[in-house]
Image: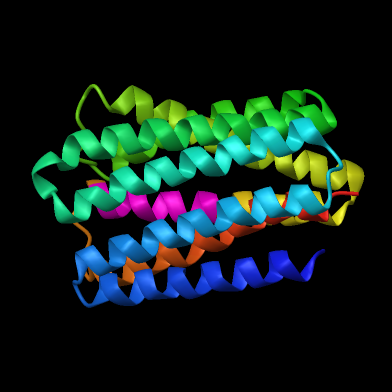
């Protein structure tokens, strides 16, 4: 992998750490700006990675759209921190953008390995699990948002399962890295769901857990483009 991609990933991590630090100190605006820069960083990793290693154009396009929609989702959720009045709408829009990002990544994995029935079953099970957890934890989610959250979690688990099948079948470093990224994404979004929709205590811990898994997830997914053979 090109040293340029490694440098971009390192810079992205610096901004991600800055985002976490500012959020923990309650500095919403500074945290938001670091969040935007970190999001731009993992998009750069994917673009530069492909420009230096143009192996699979379709995979790159799908993964690039995935991280790009993640960037837009980051923007919306970042604005929420400085404009809490519009929190519910921004969370809903941010969720839809991230959902689109997961679908694009899923398309990338399916294109590289083909359709997998076990992965689809895992995704369906993820949606059922999400419904059970929403009820078990008594999550305060608007009735219109519940179906979206169910589909979201199903897509997230389906993406992770597809990446797992792809990594197992190919044993390629790029896809192993992508799979690790999907696992971290699942952990991050689970923390985020608990943070947003349940009365958790010590929110700083959950914010740190969410962001410290989210950015490595996006970086690894973007780096899978650069690592392809």
Q: Quadrant of residue 97?
A: top left
At 17% from the left and 43% from the top, the residue drawn is: 87
Q: Residue at 76% of width from left, 48% of height from top?
A: 51
Please indicate, yes or no, whether residue 171 appears anywhere in the rendered image: yes
Q: Is the magenta stretch mostly helix, strand or loop?
A: helix
Horizontal and vertical percent position of residue 176? 78, 54
Residue at screen point 19% across, 72% down: 26
Placement of 193 over or under 11, stated as above or below:
above
In the rendered image, residue 7, in percent from the top left (x then y), is placed at: 66, 72
Q: In this view, does 189 lie to the left or right of 105?
A: left
Q: Residue furthest left?
A: 85
Quarter assignment of residue 146: top left
Q: Position of residue 174 (x, y in %)?
A: 80, 53
Total numbered circles: 0
> Which of these two is toward me, 211 or 219?
219
- The N terminus appears in which quarter of the rendering? bottom right
- Looking at the image, residue 18 sits to the left or right of residue 220; the answer is left
Residues in magenta? 184-196
Q: Which colour scheme is used?
A: rainbow
Q: Residue at x 26, y 69 (%)?
A: 30
Residue 218 included in the magenta stretch of the image: no
Q: Is residue 198 visible?
A: no
Q: Is residue 2 above or below residue 177?
A: below
Q: Does the magenta stretch include residue 192?
A: yes
| Residue sitting nearer the eye, 158 or 23 | 23
Q: In this view, does 161 lie to the left or right of 67?
A: right
Q: Where is residue 36 in the image (x, y as percent from the top left)?
A: 39, 56
Q: As displayed, is residue 77 above or below residue 69?
A: below
Q: Quadrant of residue 104?
A: top right
Question: Is residue 4 positioned above or below 108 on the image?
Answer: below
């Amino acid at each position: 992998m090109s040293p340029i991609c490694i440098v971009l990933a390192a810079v992205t991590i610096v901004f991600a750490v800055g985002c976490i630090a500012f959020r923990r100190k309650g500095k919403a605006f500074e945290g938001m700006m670091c969040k935007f820069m970190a999001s731009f960083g993992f998009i750069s990793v994917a673009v530069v990675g492909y420009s230096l290693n143009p192996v699979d154009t379709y995979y790159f396009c799908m993964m690039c759209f995935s991280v790009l929609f993640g960037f837009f989702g980051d923007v919306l959720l970042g604005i929420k921190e400085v404009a809490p009045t519009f929190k519910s709408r921004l969370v809903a829009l941010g969720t839809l953008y991230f959902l689109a990002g997961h679908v694009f990544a899923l398309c990338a994995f399916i294109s590289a390995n083909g359709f997998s029935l076990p992965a689809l079953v895992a995704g369906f099970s993820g949606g059922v699990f999400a419904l059970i957890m929403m009820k078990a934890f008594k999550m305060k989610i608007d009735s219109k948002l519940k179906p979206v959250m169910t589909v979201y979690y199903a897509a997230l688990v389906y993406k992770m399962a597809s990446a797992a099948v792809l990594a197992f079948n190919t044993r390629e470093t790029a896809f192993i890295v992508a799979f690790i990224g999907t696992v971290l994404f699942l952990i991050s979004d689970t923390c985020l769901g608990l943070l947003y929709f349940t009365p958790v205590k010590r929110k700083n811990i959950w914010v740190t857990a969410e962001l410290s898994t989210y950015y490595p997830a996006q970086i690894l997914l973007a780096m899978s483009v650069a690592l392809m053979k």
